Image (tube, grey):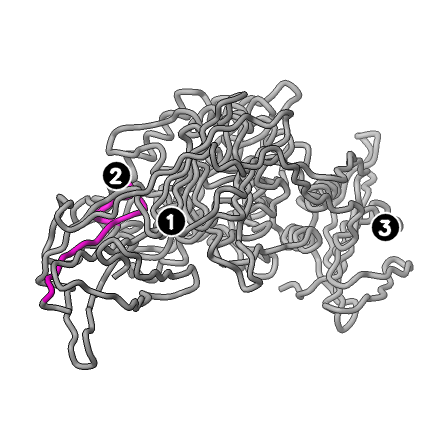
Amino acid sequence: MGWWWRLSWAVLAVAIIRDSGVRGGEVTYDGRSLIVDGQRKILFSGSIHYPRSTPEMWPSLIAKAKEGGVDVIQTYVFWNLHEPRPGEYDFSGRNDVVGFVKEIQAQGLYVCLRIGPFIESEWTYGGFPFWLHDVPDIVYRSDNEPFKLYMQNFTTKIVSMMKSEGLYASQGGPIILSQIENEYQNVEAAFGDKGPPYINTCNGMRCGETFGGPNSPTKPSLWTENWTSFYQVYGGEPYIRSAEDIAFHVTLFIAKKGSYINYYMFHGGTNFGRTASAYVITGYYDQAPLDEYGLIRQPKWGHLKDLHAAIKSCSTTILEGVQSNFSLGQLQQVISSTTQSYLLPIFSKKKEQVVQHFLVNNDQKNNATVEFRNITFELLPKSISILPDCENIIFNTAKVNLEGNEITRTSSQLFDDADRWEAYTDVIPNFADTNLKSDTLLEHMNTTKDKSDYLWYTFSLSHMLRLPFVNNKYAGSAHGSKDAKGPFTMEAPIVLNDEMNNISILSTMVGLPDSGAFLERRYAGLTRVEIRCAQQEVYNFTNNYEWGYQVGLTTNQPLTWFKIEFDAPKGDDPVVLNLSTMGKGEAWVNGQSIGRYWLSFLTSRGQPSQTLYHIPRAFLNTSGNLLVLLEESGGDPLHISVDTVSRTGLQEHASRYPPATAILFSAGTSFR
């Protein structure tokens, strides 16, 4: 077995944070926590992915995470960005992972580097470069020699780069943790004895309830993905997870001996270009504590900041105390952590007992009245209260003291002048125009090699057989969805000429798949084509009929490219492109793709899943910016606009908590 199947996490030499930055130190671990330079740590981490923003945004994003009480920045390493062709590497611009890690180091935070090589992350093809698909006999994510060869080459490249820059904590750098693979338990069974278990961590929203513990009693409990929201798909509504729910489950995990929690995502950002996986929208985890544009989202950001401060104020007792558990009633129980410490002066033999209490109410709907140390407390349903002196509550997970700050959009330019627009209508390819031909239907992904979302299937037939485009006339369309399983069928009425007829069918991908076993075997594109002339007259063109193919950025109805120039909005607020009247396609600003759009795919409430598309300020010039739209389905560019966004009601506040001695819980589940 390859070394990387043995362990999903590697704990490296840790850095010690000082006012002046970071320097190398010793890290160990046991069944309770990471131990940094001899001191146990509860660490709060936040996922920020470097290619989902821009280098110009990184300092602000990291600073806001740090201000929010985050100790660690966690990021994936994106193989398909860095090695687009075998042995050819790209670490420039948004791909500058070393520069990103150095910025984290400069701000005095740790780094958790999730090297992959498989990441999922709603990223196209799960982060794998598509050229892996053409490696003979390869089986992804298994004990397969071709796969292990290429993945080891890449991971060695990344590790060597980090070492050469002195970025591992043992060298004085910020990287304290590295991870190989991701969510392997979802596919493990499919590989039989070629996929041995190594699960050591938890992903999800309720790991305090669901995680059974690491795969060894000598390893700490780590929550690698605490989902602050959820990714959104075209046709789907946003998932709203409250600050109260996140805070409750974080504290529950800590109470059950968890010591590392990563918020996935702390900032989601943007799936620029064609990087989003199948049906995933361009905006990523916009409901995170920092929204897609990097603006602080209240009350989520501030409530978690206060929670972090409260937990850290009593972390010594939580981590070092001896834990005990007893009942307070039918639906109530208490978990206590007790430590002994010598009173000053240090030569005194008298000890002081410090007790940390977790008081639990399992009633989901009702308040609970409990007696604790001869004091009566009223607990909110499913909530946790922190008492520094066993009398005064300084934090409650269900009590939010901050107002929400709604997003405000300010229009800058409306593109309603038809004379400013230039348009180009694409030519629909006929069979005779194509260079690639086959006597069977080719698979979409293997034909395009992920160079384009689009693949034309074309064939010709004569009048003897009295689609879609038939003789350059649009015939119809259909599409699948993220929730749909398996293929879908389109039926379209057509009219054929008495002479030669050209049929052109456009297959469009909206991102490659990103998960599941045997990803290398996935199929996309046409699987069967028939023409029915009458009830009993069916002609099958699937096999043994010559097809022509064209790969390229062309579309269906009406196959139009639009372009216009505009000036950058004044100020520093984030810039967005409001595409509310467009249909489906992709947008570029000064040659850089800001992502796919699909306004015509409506949610169950009759609204698009995403209307505003982020244009990073770094993409813009002061004037003369070129906007290009590739429109597939008849959108109207005369009512789109460039706007700016901001958030109202942002409150400045700081968390200052004395050491706490008790935490009271009103929980939705019992401890086990």
User: Which numbered disc, 3 or 1, marks the residue that appears first in the sequence?
Assistant: 3
Q: Which residues are magenta?
A: 445-463
| Disc 2/disc 1 C-alpha distance (Å) | 37 Å
Q: Position of residue 254 (x, y in %)?
A: 65, 50
Is 122 situated above or below 375? above
| Disc 3/disc 2 C-alpha distance (Å) | 57 Å
Q: Position of residue 34 (x, y in %)?
A: 56, 40
Is 23 situated above or below 215? above
Is 421 situated above or below 543? above
Is 454 one of the magenta-colored residues? Answer: yes
Q: Residue at x 76, y 63 (%)?
A: 381
User: Which numbered disc, 2 or 1, marks the residue that appears first in the sequence?
Assistant: 2
Q: Amino acid at mark 3?
A: Cys
- Binning the other alpha carbons within 10 Å of mark 1 as few (below 14), some (14 to 19) or many (20 upward) gives many
| Disc 3/disc 1 C-alpha distance (Å) | 64 Å
Q: Secondary structure at mark 2?
A: helix
- Identify which residue, 539 or 17, lies in the foreground: 539
Q: Residue at x 74, y 52 (%)?
A: 397
Is disc 2 in contact with disc 1, using a CB cutoff of under 8 Å? no
Q: Which residue is mark 2?
A: 150
- Binning the other alpha carbons within 10 Å of mark 3 as few (below 14), some (14 to 19) or many (20 upward) gives some
Q: Amino acid at mark 1?
A: Glu
Q: Which residue is mark 3?
A: 390
Which mark's residue is nearer the viewer, 3 or 2?
Answer: 2
Residue 134 appears left or right of 604: left
Q: Residue at x 42, y 59 (%)?
A: 482
Q: Kindly give the residue lying farthest to the top in the view shown.
A: 20
Q: Secondary structure at mark 3?
A: loop
Q: Amino acid at mark 2?
A: Tyr
Q: Position of residue 583 (x, y in %)?
A: 45, 50
Q: Secondary structure at mark 1?
A: loop
Q: Which residue is mark 1?
A: 632
